[in-house]
Amino acid sequence: MAMKLYSWNVNGIRAVINKGTFQQFIADHQPDILCLQETKAKQGQAEIDLPEYHEYWNSAEKAGYSGTAIFTKIKPLSVINGFTDDIATKFGLADDGYGDPNKEGRVISAEFDDFWVVTVYTPNAKGDLSRLELRHKKWDPAFLAHIKELEKSKPVIFCGDLNVAHNEIDLANPKPNIGKHGFTDEERAGFDNFEVAGFFDTFRSAYPDKKDAYSWWTHWANARARNVGWRIDYWLASKALKPRVKNPQIHADVMGSDHCPVSIEIH
């Protein structure tokens, strides 16, 4: 029996509900576990009627900003919002002028019988790279420390909008974007560090050479229709789960956000 796990940056859950695309997605795909990023809402602010799902929200203190959620048919054993104080303190995560990343609702970790599922909305480095230092020196190491800590108890599967295209194959126009936000050496190194630590990119593991596979498209220049995109939404997993992870997919036909859902199955 396979469990279907989906991740989707909805870019505002109220917007995708108002468009009807969220309800259609749930009906068509029936995820067992659905991880959302950029909900831009607090629980109760969105007209959601999903009685078969348990809902867990980690919303930003700032209204209409950031935020994550997990909707799951299987009730978790435990749920952790954000990082522990120890990790936040160790890596010096604090207000960097944009806000305190600990208070932006960026991480939820849900414990199930034989693995953890973690959803993350990684801070964007910004067009002028003004948040790159926070991202590279603090956030990425803190997130890695967090998942490694969870992994001490059971394997980890993590997903979300990591705001980086890992390799040149992961974006339509790599050359002109080298050094720009989402494709800096620093951000790509952060991803490298996940792999060094024993987590594998489920999609790239199955399809090492697959081109034109993107999960985000700018609103400009008809980019989505032309498939001029970036793959910045991922499922990564502990190596121990490699035999059980099947059928990684990018659902580019699901509309409603500038990102599309990405999924895996756990057997």
Image (tube, rainbow, N blue to C red):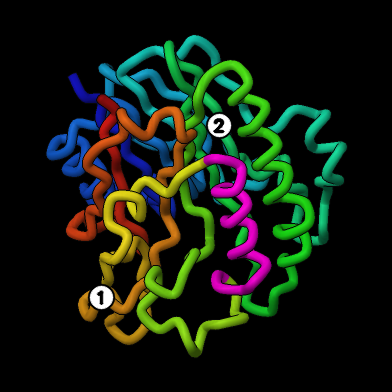
Tell me if residue 239 comes above or below residue 203 in the rendering: above
Q: Amino acid at mark 1?
A: Asn
Q: Position of residue 60 (x, y in %)?
A: 63, 42
Which label is found at residue 227?
1
In front of the other: 263 or 192:
192
Sort mark 2 into few (<14), some (14-19) or many (20+) by Cα contacts within 10 Å: many
Indicate the secondary structure of the residue bearing disc 1. Answer: loop
Magenta highlight range: 182-198
Question: Is the N terminus in the top left, top right, bottom left or bottom right quadrant?
Answer: top left
Disc on the earlier residue, 2 or 1: 2
Residue bearing mark 2: 108
**Which residue sits at x=17%, y=37%?**
29
Q: How many marks?
A: 2
In the image, residue 178 lies at what x, y percent? 56, 82
- Say whether residue 44 is visible: no
**Residue 180 falls within the magenta-colored stretch:** no
Q: Main secondary structure of the magenta part?
A: helix
Q: Residues within 10 Å of mark 1 (few under 14, many from 20)?
A: some
Rendered residue at 25%/24% (across/down): 267
- At label 2, which amino acid type do we have? Ile
Q: Residue at x 73, y 42 (%)?
A: 142
Residue displayed at 49% across by 10% down: 77
**Element on which disc 2 rests:** strand
Residue 249: x percent and y percent?
24, 49
Nearer to us in this view, 68 or 250: 250
On screen, 149 above or below 253?
A: above
